[in-house]
Image: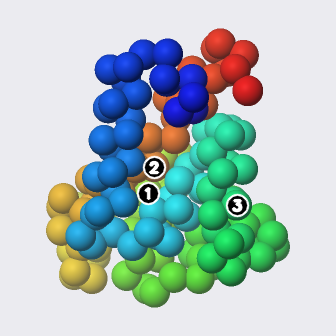
Amino acid sequence: PLRFLANSPGLFEVQTNQIGYYQNHPTLDPELLAIIRYTSACWFKNNACIEFNAYILEKQGMTKNELILLRTDPDKAPLEKKDRALLCFVYNGIRDQDSATEDNLQQLRALGWTDSDIVDAVSHGFFMYAPGKLLDLFKFS
C-alpha cells in the first residue's frame, strides 16, 4: 500500500503521518495495534496487510494457529484483559456498526480506556479498509 500511495505525495505523507501517530501512541500497545490491523485486514480481505501483520505477529511469537483463531475469536488473543476488551470492541465494530452501546463503552472506560483511545483503536481497524480496496481497484500487488 505504501508503494502504491507513493504515486500521490500528499496521500503518502498523510499515510506515513498516521503510521507515525500510532507508532508513538501513548496508550495503545504496538502488539494490540498489530492484532487490530491483522483482524481488521482479515475482515476486509486486505491481503497485503494480512500478510504484513501476520509477519509482525509471528516475529513477536504468535503461532500460525493463534493467527487463524484470531480471525474468528479475538477473545482468545494473547493480550491482557484490558487490551483484549478493546480488541473485541473494534472487532465487533468493524463487522457491525450498530454494535456499540453505551454499556460496552462504559465497560471499556471502567478498564481505563479513554474515549480518545477507543476512537483511535476503532479508527485503526477501519484504516485497513481503504488501502486494500485501492489495491484491488488498481490491480496493484
> Residue 112 location, x and y as percent?
22, 80
Residue 90: image tag: 1
- Mark 3, residue position: 55
Q: Nearer the viewer, mark 3 or mark 2?
A: 3
> Residue 87 location, x and y as percent?
46, 66
> Residue 117 location, x and y as percent?
25, 63
Going 37% across and 82% down the picture, which residue do you hit?
82
Looking at the picture, tell me which residue is in the foreground, 76 or 133: 133
Amino acid identity at mark 3: Tyr
Residue 133: image tag: none
* Distance CA(mark 1)–CA(mark 3): 21 Å
* Distance CA(mark 1)–CA(mark 2): 7 Å
* Distance CA(mark 3)–CA(mark 2): 18 Å
Amino acid identity at mark 1: Val
Mark 2 crowd level (few <14, some 14–19, many ≥20, 10 Å Cα): many
Residue contact between numbered discs 3 and 2, judged by CB atoms under 8 Å: no
Residue contact between numbered discs 1 and 2, judged by CB atoms under 8 Å: yes
Amino acid identity at mark 2: Gly
Q: Earlier in the sequence, mark 1 or mark 2?
A: 1
Q: Earlier in the sequence, mark 3 or mark 2?
A: 3
- Mark 2, residue position: 125
Extreme residue in the top direction: 138
Say what secondary structure mark 2 lies in. helix
> Residue 126 location, x and y as percent?
44, 42
Q: Is residue 36 visible?
A: yes
Give the side of residue 87 with respect to residue 68, left or right.
Answer: left
